Image: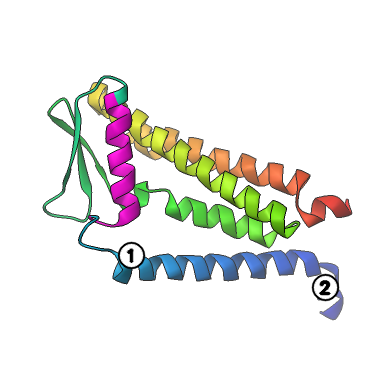
Amino acid sequence: MKELILKYKTVIKFILTFLLVYAVLSFSYKLYLQYGSSETYYPDYMTNLVAKQSKELLETFGYNAQIIPHPDEPSMKLIINNKYVARVIEGCNSVSVIILFASFIIAFAGKIKTTFFYLLAGSVLIYIANLVRVVILSVGLYHYPWRKDILHTVIFPAIIYGMVCLLWLFWVNRFSNSAKKS
């Protein structure tokens, strides 16, 4: 058994580090959602921000957009040209995806400065891609509401998680300590 642990030490270290970082960040985010939300930003700051920025982007593309708090659930209603097309919920704000991304990068850490800046740049890129995803999804739901299932459950998750996987691969092959050992 000791031989197996020594042989797969780096794999075990990666898995344990990933799980620990993911658990700590997820728990912290859960606490933030539970206790850190304010009355100013409904349902929470990040979800509210994504809804507002989605509205602004939609208006930039010539749509008459508005957001209003959903009366029955913690979300924001996104309305395009007086048609309710989507609700922006906590899962739409990209924080969970960024936590997943960050956990992997930290588990495969490189130099501290490089790791920090890659985490920052990758998180911003994921946030922007998610914002564009929400806008395109909203426009798609406005024009093609019958395509809701394929747009929301297949195409857009594939894009966001595909991008995260590409960022991970780039990190592992270019900047992580394990890339330097190879």
> Amino acid type of disc 1?
Leu
Q: Residues at badges 2 and 1 in contact (C-beta under 8 Å)?
A: no
Q: Is residue 102 magenta?
A: no
Q: Position of residue 3 (x, y in %)?
A: 87, 76
Q: Residue at x 56, y 39 (%)?
A: 162
> From the image, which quarter does the N terminus lie in?
bottom right
Q: Tell me where the magenta segment starts and ends, as one range.
A: 42-59
Does residue 53 show up magenta in the picture?
yes
Of 79 and 40, the residue lying toward us: 40
In percent of width and height, residue 60 lies at 31, 24
Identify which amino acid the numbered label 2 is placed on: Leu
> Which of 108 and 156 lies nearest the eye of the viewer?
108
Q: Is residue 147 visible?
A: no
Image coordinates of residue 79 in percent, x first then y, are 18, 33
Residue 151: % across, % down:
36, 32
Q: CA distance from mark 2 to mark 1?
A: 41 Å
* First in residue order: circle 2 vs circle 1: 2
Q: Quadrant of residue 88?
A: top left
Q: 71 or 147: which is nearer to us?
A: 71
Q: Residue furthest bottom?
A: 2
Residue labelled with disc 2: 4
Total numbered circles: 2
Would you place residue 44 above or below residue 68 in this image? Answer: below
Assign a secondary structure to mark 1. Answer: helix
Would you identify the image quadrant in which residue 33 lies?
bottom left
Instruction: Assign a secondary structure to mark 2.
Output: helix
Crowd class of label 1 (few under 14; some 14 to 19; many from 20; radius 10 Å): some
Residue 33 is labelled as: 1
